[in-house]
Image: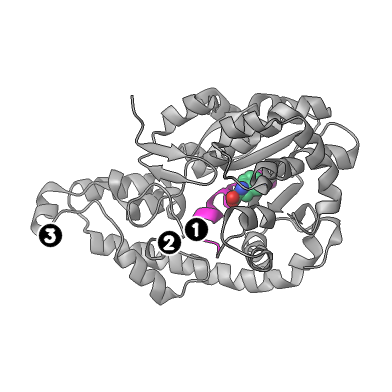
Amino acid sequence: MPEDFKVTPWEVTGDIDYDLLMRQFGTSPIDEALLERLSGYGPLHPMLRRGIFYTHRDMAWLLNEYDKGNSFTLYTGRGPSGNTHLGHLMPWIFNKWVQDTFGCDMLFQMTDDEKFLFKDLSLEETGRMAYENALDFVALGFDPKKTKIIVDTKNVRRMYPIALEVAKRTTFSTAKAVFGFDNSTNIGSIFYTTMQSVPAFLPSADAGRQVPVLIPCGIDQDPHFRVTRDAAPHLGYPKPSLIFCKMFPGLNGGDKMSSSDENATIYTTDTPKAVKKKVGRAFTGGRVSVEEQRQLGGNPEVCAVFKYNFYLFEKDDAKLNELADKCRKGEILCGECKMCLTERINVFLEGHQDRREKAKDVVGDMTYDGFEW
Ligand code: TRP
């Protein structure tokens, strides 16, 4: 059966069938038993309850180690190619919940090298964006004593020997099969996955013992970590565990918020006016006229405004269901929903922009190996 979607670390297009994707990638579902077990450590995050984080690798092993007193380090990252938008924040917010719930150390990798190699950007530009994006990460409130930020070109001296170990055990034919590289691919891109593998092994390398690692991230990153996990036993380190989320939707009704459509993307630095305009133009599940909508009701399943409440802005399940119900019955119109979402996003951004300013004072102390920005 031909698929009409594509999910790779560099490209996400089409109508994503997440269950099919899970089977193709060979990851495991987050089932009731795992949710039940996770709820034993603290109240479940809405992203788990709602199936936004929906699939994983080796979570049971990770929790077994944790229960034995072998706590894990968290690892996630960002390719600094532009301003941070809500889609980037979503998995970071989940990471923060994991850090709070399990009290773990955390590594945040900024892959300025990756974006230099894969995009039309200079190293100077990706380096500057690394700093800007790090402010958004820090603004979410990660514990400054337990959290370190890696920038690949700054920390390369520590990373390179581990990257080499991975590179030696990864063939070109694997890279081609996993990523679809061909003869026109620049050779830096072929090497890059080894750099993204390094933070999965750094905690063990630094501690001199086997430290479990959990990587919460978008499902599009799995191809990288399949390579990482295959290399792990050869390096004598445990395979990192992973927990994956779905892509954060665009305001245009698409499956992934993307900087290529600026009007369908909410950046952390947007003004209240810009947010109002963008939400005002959002794709909804509404009908062509008020009369029809009152009579037939709207369709929250396809509505970007509803999805924003589902993914981030309505944490109360009962209220979320009530909203969907009202929409289906035609009791609430799109204009009202858009106004309400605009208000919520602007309240969030006002606080975030404040914390982002304050982050400038601490971001210097959170660098791995103490590099200077
Ligand atoms: N490749 C990711 C991106 O393009 C950045 C990244 C590096 C990352 N390490 C990671 C993402 C670990 C998630 C988890 O944004």
If the image is split into quadrants, where does the C terminus sit?
bottom right
Identity of the residue drawn at 75% across and 54% down: 150
Name the residue carrying label 3.
Answer: 290
Name the residue carrying label 2.
Answer: 265
Residue 283, position as x, y percentages in the image: 28, 56
Any magenta on residue 88?
yes
Q: Is mark 2 within 8 Å of ligand 1?
A: no
Asked which secondary structure carries label 2, the reply is loop
Foreground mark, 3 or 2? Answer: 2
Closest to the observer: 73 or 239? 239
Left or right of 330? Residue 28 is right
Kind of residue at disc 3: Val
Kind of residue at disc 2: Thr
Tell me whether circle 1 and circle 3 mark residues in contact (CB < 8 Å).
no
Residue range highlighted in magenta? 83-100
Tell me whether circle 2 and circle 1 mark residues in contact (CB < 8 Å).
yes
Would you place residue 315 above or below residue 343 in this image?
above
